[in-house]
Image: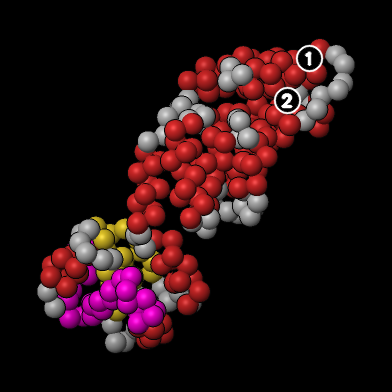
Amino acid sequence: MDFQKDVLDISNVRPVVVDFWAPWCGPCRYLGPTLDKLAGQQSNLWSLVKINVDEHPELSQQFGIMSIPAVKMFYKGDIVAEFTGALPLSDIEKWLEENLPSEDKAALAAILQSAGSIPDTAFMEALRPLVAEHPEHKQARTVLARHLVFTSPREAVALLEDIHMGDEHFDLADHIRKWAHFLQIELDEQGQIADLLRKAQEAAGQGNFEEAIQQIIEANRLDKNYLDDLPRLTAIAFFGIFGTKHELTKKYRRTFDMVLY
Protein backbone atom coordinates (compact mmCIF):
# COMPACT_ATOMS: atom_id res chain seq x y z
CA MET A 1 0.00 0.00 0.00
CA ASP A 2 0.96 3.64 -0.46
CA PHE A 3 0.09 5.42 2.81
CA GLN A 4 0.45 8.87 1.28
CA LYS A 5 -1.89 8.05 -1.59
CA ASP A 6 -4.33 5.68 0.13
CA VAL A 7 -4.71 7.59 3.38
CA LEU A 8 -3.28 11.10 3.53
CA ASP A 9 -4.28 12.22 0.04
CA ILE A 10 -7.77 10.73 0.37
CA SER A 11 -8.15 12.37 3.79
CA ASN A 12 -8.02 15.77 2.10
CA VAL A 13 -11.34 14.89 0.46
CA ARG A 14 -13.03 12.68 3.08
CA PRO A 15 -12.17 11.17 6.47
CA VAL A 16 -10.17 7.94 6.39
CA VAL A 17 -10.44 5.47 9.27
CA VAL A 18 -7.30 3.34 9.55
CA ASP A 19 -7.42 0.00 11.34
CA PHE A 20 -3.98 -1.17 12.50
CA TRP A 21 -4.30 -4.93 12.96
CA ALA A 22 -2.55 -8.32 12.64
CA PRO A 23 -3.82 -11.81 11.74
CA TRP A 24 -2.72 -13.29 15.08
CA CYS A 25 -4.64 -10.66 17.11
CA GLY A 26 -7.91 -12.06 18.50
CA PRO A 27 -9.54 -8.69 19.28
CA CYS A 28 -8.59 -7.55 15.76
CA ARG A 29 -10.60 -10.40 14.28
CA TYR A 30 -13.58 -9.28 16.37
CA LEU A 31 -13.26 -5.61 15.47
CA GLY A 32 -12.51 -6.04 11.76
CA PRO A 33 -15.95 -7.25 10.60
CA THR A 34 -17.64 -4.51 12.63
CA LEU A 35 -15.59 -1.83 10.91
CA ASP A 36 -16.25 -3.46 7.54
CA LYS A 37 -19.99 -3.38 8.20
CA LEU A 38 -19.99 0.27 9.26
CA ALA A 39 -17.76 1.28 6.36
CA GLY A 40 -20.25 -0.32 3.98
CA GLN A 41 -23.22 1.39 5.62
CA GLN A 42 -21.54 4.79 5.73
CA SER A 43 -19.50 4.65 2.54
CA ASN A 44 -20.71 8.13 1.63
CA LEU A 45 -19.15 9.55 4.81
CA TRP A 46 -15.73 7.93 5.26
CA SER A 47 -13.30 5.37 3.89
CA LEU A 48 -11.71 2.40 5.67
CA VAL A 49 -8.08 1.36 5.25
CA LYS A 50 -6.63 -1.67 7.03
CA ILE A 51 -2.93 -1.88 7.79
CA ASN A 52 -1.30 -5.15 8.83
CA VAL A 53 1.35 -4.05 11.34
CA ASP A 54 3.46 -7.13 10.59
CA GLU A 55 3.69 -6.13 6.94
CA HIS A 56 4.17 -2.42 7.65
CA PRO A 57 6.25 -2.10 10.84
CA GLU A 58 7.49 1.32 9.71
CA LEU A 59 3.94 2.70 9.87
CA SER A 60 3.36 1.06 13.23
CA GLN A 61 6.48 2.81 14.53
CA GLN A 62 5.64 6.11 12.86
CA PHE A 63 2.25 6.33 14.55
CA GLY A 64 3.32 4.93 17.91
CA ILE A 65 1.21 1.79 17.78
CA MET A 66 1.79 0.10 21.13
CA SER A 67 -1.15 -2.31 21.08
CA ILE A 68 -3.69 -3.50 18.54
CA PRO A 69 -6.28 -3.13 17.32
CA ALA A 70 -5.60 0.59 17.05
CA VAL A 71 -7.97 2.76 15.04
CA LYS A 72 -7.16 6.29 13.89
CA MET A 73 -9.25 8.74 11.91
CA PHE A 74 -7.33 10.95 9.47
CA TYR A 75 -8.76 14.18 8.04
CA LYS A 76 -6.91 16.83 6.07
CA GLY A 77 -3.73 14.86 6.68
CA ASP A 78 -4.03 14.89 10.49
CA ILE A 79 -5.21 12.41 13.10
CA VAL A 80 -8.46 13.86 14.43
CA ALA A 81 -9.64 10.93 16.59
CA GLU A 82 -8.51 7.47 17.69
CA PHE A 83 -9.24 4.52 19.95
CA THR A 84 -7.64 1.21 20.87
CA GLY A 85 -9.21 -2.16 21.60
CA ALA A 86 -12.18 -4.03 20.19
CA LEU A 87 -15.04 -1.68 21.02
CA PRO A 88 -18.63 -2.87 20.59
CA LEU A 89 -20.67 -1.68 17.64
CA SER A 90 -22.63 0.93 19.63
CA ASP A 91 -19.46 2.55 20.97
CA ILE A 92 -17.90 2.74 17.51
CA GLU A 93 -21.07 4.29 16.10
CA LYS A 94 -20.95 6.90 18.86
CA TRP A 95 -17.24 7.52 18.19
CA LEU A 96 -17.96 8.07 14.51
CA GLU A 97 -20.90 10.35 15.22
CA GLU A 98 -18.86 12.50 17.58
CA ASN A 99 -15.73 12.74 15.45
CA LEU A 100 -16.68 12.65 11.77
CA PRO A 101 -16.25 16.13 10.30
CA SER A 102 -19.36 17.70 8.82
CA GLU A 103 -20.52 20.99 7.37
CA ASP A 104 -22.58 21.83 10.43
CA LYS A 105 -19.64 21.14 12.76
CA ALA A 106 -17.48 23.40 10.64
CA ALA A 107 -20.19 26.05 10.71
CA LEU A 108 -20.43 25.75 14.48
CA ALA A 109 -16.67 26.09 14.86
CA ALA A 110 -16.69 29.21 12.70
CA ILE A 111 -19.57 30.76 14.65
CA LEU A 112 -17.98 29.92 18.00
CA GLN A 113 -14.85 31.79 16.97
CA SER A 114 -16.97 34.87 16.31
CA ALA A 115 -18.37 35.08 19.85
CA GLY A 116 -17.91 38.40 21.62
CA SER A 117 -18.70 39.49 25.13
CA ILE A 118 -21.57 37.79 26.93
CA PRO A 119 -24.36 38.29 25.95
CA ASP A 120 -23.58 38.80 22.26
CA THR A 121 -26.75 39.50 20.26
CA ALA A 122 -25.13 39.14 16.83
CA PHE A 123 -23.55 35.85 17.91
CA MET A 124 -26.90 34.52 19.12
CA GLU A 125 -28.58 35.43 15.85
CA ALA A 126 -25.86 33.63 13.91
CA LEU A 127 -26.09 30.53 16.10
CA ARG A 128 -29.89 30.23 16.26
CA PRO A 129 -30.37 28.84 12.71
CA LEU A 130 -27.74 26.15 13.29
CA VAL A 131 -29.41 25.09 16.55
CA ALA A 132 -32.82 25.02 14.87
CA GLU A 133 -31.51 22.89 12.00
CA HIS A 134 -29.35 20.61 14.17
CA PRO A 135 -30.96 20.30 17.61
CA GLU A 136 -28.84 17.21 18.26
CA HIS A 137 -25.79 19.44 18.76
CA LYS A 138 -25.71 19.81 22.53
CA GLN A 139 -22.65 22.03 22.39
CA ALA A 140 -24.39 24.50 20.10
CA ARG A 141 -27.49 24.56 22.30
CA THR A 142 -25.43 25.02 25.46
CA VAL A 143 -23.39 27.86 23.99
CA LEU A 144 -26.55 29.57 22.75
CA ALA A 145 -28.14 29.17 26.19
CA ARG A 146 -25.01 30.68 27.78
CA HIS A 147 -25.68 33.96 25.96
CA LEU A 148 -29.46 33.73 25.92
CA VAL A 149 -29.92 33.23 29.68
CA PHE A 150 -29.34 36.91 30.40
CA THR A 151 -32.26 38.07 28.28
CA SER A 152 -34.50 35.00 27.94
CA PRO A 153 -33.84 32.64 30.87
CA ARG A 154 -36.83 30.39 30.21
CA GLU A 155 -35.80 29.81 26.61
CA ALA A 156 -32.22 29.17 27.71
CA VAL A 157 -33.27 26.51 30.20
CA ALA A 158 -35.51 24.84 27.62
CA LEU A 159 -32.48 24.38 25.36
CA LEU A 160 -30.79 22.33 28.10
CA GLU A 161 -33.66 20.00 28.93
CA ASP A 162 -31.86 16.78 27.94
CA ILE A 163 -28.43 17.67 29.39
CA HIS A 164 -28.00 15.72 32.61
CA MET A 165 -25.23 14.79 35.02
CA GLY A 166 -22.50 12.85 33.24
CA ASP A 167 -22.91 14.79 30.01
CA GLU A 168 -19.78 16.69 28.97
CA HIS A 169 -21.79 19.93 28.87
CA PHE A 170 -23.49 19.41 32.23
CA ASP A 171 -21.38 21.78 34.34
CA LEU A 172 -22.04 24.79 32.12
CA ALA A 173 -25.69 23.80 31.72
CA ASP A 174 -26.04 23.62 35.50
CA HIS A 175 -24.56 27.11 35.90
CA ILE A 176 -27.00 28.43 33.30
CA ARG A 177 -29.97 26.82 35.06
CA LYS A 178 -28.96 28.29 38.42
CA TRP A 179 -28.47 31.76 36.97
CA ALA A 180 -31.84 31.50 35.20
CA HIS A 181 -33.43 30.51 38.50
CA PHE A 182 -31.94 33.59 40.17
CA LEU A 183 -33.19 35.93 37.45
CA GLN A 184 -36.72 34.52 37.63
CA ILE A 185 -37.19 34.02 41.36
CA GLU A 186 -39.59 36.49 43.01
CA LEU A 187 -37.94 37.84 46.14
CA ASP A 188 -40.85 38.95 48.29
CA GLU A 189 -38.89 38.71 51.55
CA GLN A 190 -37.95 41.80 53.53
CA GLY A 191 -34.49 42.59 54.76
CA GLN A 192 -31.04 43.62 53.62
CA ILE A 193 -30.11 40.38 51.84
CA ALA A 194 -33.31 40.31 49.79
CA ASP A 195 -32.76 43.97 48.90
CA LEU A 196 -29.24 43.20 47.70
CA LEU A 197 -30.43 40.31 45.55
CA ARG A 198 -33.25 42.38 44.06
CA LYS A 199 -30.71 45.06 43.16
CA ALA A 200 -28.58 42.37 41.55
CA GLN A 201 -31.55 41.15 39.50
CA GLU A 202 -32.28 44.70 38.36
CA ALA A 203 -28.64 45.38 37.48
CA ALA A 204 -28.39 42.12 35.50
CA GLY A 205 -31.59 42.99 33.65
CA GLN A 206 -29.99 46.28 32.62
CA GLY A 207 -26.80 44.56 31.51
CA ASN A 208 -24.77 45.93 34.39
CA PHE A 209 -23.14 42.66 35.38
CA GLU A 210 -20.43 44.22 37.51
CA GLU A 211 -23.03 45.84 39.73
CA ALA A 212 -24.92 42.55 39.83
CA ILE A 213 -21.96 40.50 41.07
CA GLN A 214 -21.04 43.18 43.59
CA GLN A 215 -24.51 42.95 45.14
CA ILE A 216 -24.44 39.14 45.07
CA ILE A 217 -21.06 39.03 46.81
CA GLU A 218 -22.32 41.40 49.48
CA ALA A 219 -25.34 39.15 49.99
CA ASN A 220 -22.94 36.25 50.48
CA ARG A 221 -21.02 38.29 53.03
CA LEU A 222 -24.19 38.65 55.09
CA ASP A 223 -25.54 35.11 54.66
CA LYS A 224 -24.34 32.80 51.89
CA ASN A 225 -26.98 30.20 52.87
CA TYR A 226 -29.97 32.54 52.50
CA LEU A 227 -32.93 30.87 50.71
CA ASP A 228 -31.28 27.47 50.24
CA ASP A 229 -27.83 28.89 49.41
CA LEU A 230 -29.20 31.25 46.75
CA PRO A 231 -26.40 33.88 47.08
CA ARG A 232 -23.62 31.28 47.01
CA LEU A 233 -25.03 29.20 44.14
CA THR A 234 -25.84 32.31 42.11
CA ALA A 235 -22.30 33.67 42.41
CA ILE A 236 -20.81 30.31 41.41
CA ALA A 237 -23.17 30.19 38.42
CA PHE A 238 -22.19 33.73 37.43
CA PHE A 239 -18.48 32.93 37.34
CA GLY A 240 -19.14 29.58 35.67
CA ILE A 241 -21.00 31.24 32.80
CA PHE A 242 -18.52 34.05 32.26
CA GLY A 243 -15.50 31.75 32.57
CA THR A 244 -12.11 32.10 34.18
CA LYS A 245 -10.71 34.48 31.54
CA HIS A 246 -13.46 37.10 31.77
CA GLU A 247 -12.46 40.39 33.38
CA LEU A 248 -15.28 40.20 35.95
CA THR A 249 -14.19 36.73 37.03
CA LYS A 250 -10.59 37.88 37.36
CA LYS A 251 -11.68 40.94 39.32
CA TYR A 252 -14.26 39.43 41.70
CA ARG A 253 -13.74 35.66 42.01
CA ARG A 254 -11.02 35.98 44.65
CA THR A 255 -13.17 38.42 46.64
CA PHE A 256 -16.05 35.95 46.53
CA ASP A 257 -13.82 33.07 47.66
CA MET A 258 -12.57 35.16 50.59
CA VAL A 259 -16.15 35.93 51.59
CA LEU A 260 -17.01 32.23 51.55
CA TYR A 261 -14.02 30.99 53.50
Relative image position of residue 139 (x, y in whole percent): 50, 49
Q: Nearer the viewer, residue 118 or 7?
A: 118
Q: Judge from the rendering whether residue 218 lies leftward or rightward of residue 108; answer left or right.
A: right
- Residue 5 location, x and y as percent? 12, 70
Image quarter of the N terminus: bottom left
Residue 35 visible in the picture? no
What residue type is disc 2 on?
Pro
Badge 1 is on which residue?
A: 195
- Up the image or down, 177 lies above or below 78; here it is above
Q: Position of residue 90 (x, y in %)?
A: 50, 74
Query: What residue is pinned by disc 2?
Result: 231
Q: Residue 115 appears at what percent x and percent y?
A: 42, 34
How is this picture coloured? secondary structure
Q: Is residue 137 left or right of residue 199?
A: left
Span highlighted in magenta in the image: 38-64
> Considering the numbered disc 1 on the image, is that residue within a helix, a strand or a loop?
helix
